[in-house]
Amino acid sequence: MNLSQLYYFRKLAELQHYTRSAKELFITQPTLSGSISSLEQELGVSLFQKTGRNVELTKYGAEFLVYVNAALEQLDKGVAIMKGYSGESDGGTIDLGCIITVQTDYIPQLLNMYRQDSDHEYEFNISQKPSQVLLENLVKGENDVIFCAKDDISSDITYVPVVAQEFIVAMSERSPLAQKDYILPEDLLGSNLISYREQIPLGKSVKSLLDSLGVDNVKYSFDDESILAGFAVNGVDVALMIDTFFLRNVEGMVLKPFYNNEVEKKKFYHCIYMAYSNKRYHPYCVDHFIEYVTEHQLDKNDQSMIFFD
């Protein structure tokens, strides 16, 4: 058994196709087939089985892959660290996904701070999508790390809190609530309330929060702050939403803080998380970035704030 065989095995397990795997490994298909066959003979078990034109891991192959991933991950990290010591940085690219509300402020600030504090010069491929899509892409391995709302899509995802976004009440200048300095849960009773649709992670969290406060006269139908603001400023609806850059230039919009009660006057904050797979292989550059963000995570112990996911 040699190191090349393990890399070949991992690639074939990933793509489940001999021709495509050989192409990405820059070897011929017969070379790949011979290497896998030799590995199976040495181990005494079949690692793959045919399924049409593709192959899939056997139960032995799936178990062996866990050990191969762990071994190669540690090896790659060791090589990267040694190259770093010698001044020969291996660089690396991190595929980062984020929701639009952190794309214009938090992400640029984070990456600038990371580059200033780090000796490594990694490249970032940044894509912007809704939380649901980002989480699905993370599970499929299309992103290394993402910044999004929390959801229960998979137990293989680790979440690190990074940003607190204030939950506010928005309305037109004509609304009776516009005359108040702040809004309490009981002030919302009797109003036409709108918020995010329940099918998205943020909508689930908002509904859970409002249900706990006894606010049940809410229409959950909207995707983001821009459309919520549009309905609120042009009609009789009152929007319950996150305070984001979407609201900065909406003419006629009135924004009010939302407190839990008259005595404590605590505001509500929705958490945005860095999320990454705790099962998939990460190159050294990805692990280094994850460690950095984790060290600078949001402190959720502030008693003056009420956090919700």
Image: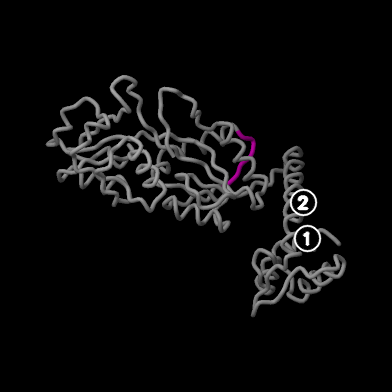
Q: Is residue 68 magenta?
A: no
Main SS class of the magenta portion in the image: loop
Using the rendered view, name the quadrant where residue 169 is placed: top left
Q: Secondary structure at mark 2?
A: helix
Using the rendered view, name the quadrant where residue 252 is placed: top left
In the rendered view, does 215 fall on the left or right side of 276?
left
The CA span between labels 1 and 2 is 9 Å
Q: Residues within 10 Å of mark 1 (few under 14, many from 20)?
A: some
Compared to residue 114, the image places residue 201 above or below, namely below
Quarter of the rendering occupied by the N terminus: bottom right
Using the rendered view, name the quadrant where residue 84 is placed: top right
The spot of residue 81 in percent (x, y) is: 74, 41
The residue lying toward the viewer, choosing from 270 and 86, is 270
Q: Residues within 10 Å of mark 2 (few under 14, many from 20)?
A: few
Q: Are marks 1 and 2 in contact (CB under 8 Å)?
A: yes
Q: What's the residue at 42%, 47% (across, down)?
A: 99
| Range shown magenta | 118-123
In the rendered view, does 4 fall on the left or right side of 232?
right
Residue denoted by label 2: 71
The spot of residue 96 in percent (x, y) is: 52, 48
Residue denoted by label 1: 6
The spot of residue 236 in percent (x, y) is: 15, 43
Q: What's the residue at 67%, 74% (across, down)?
A: 19
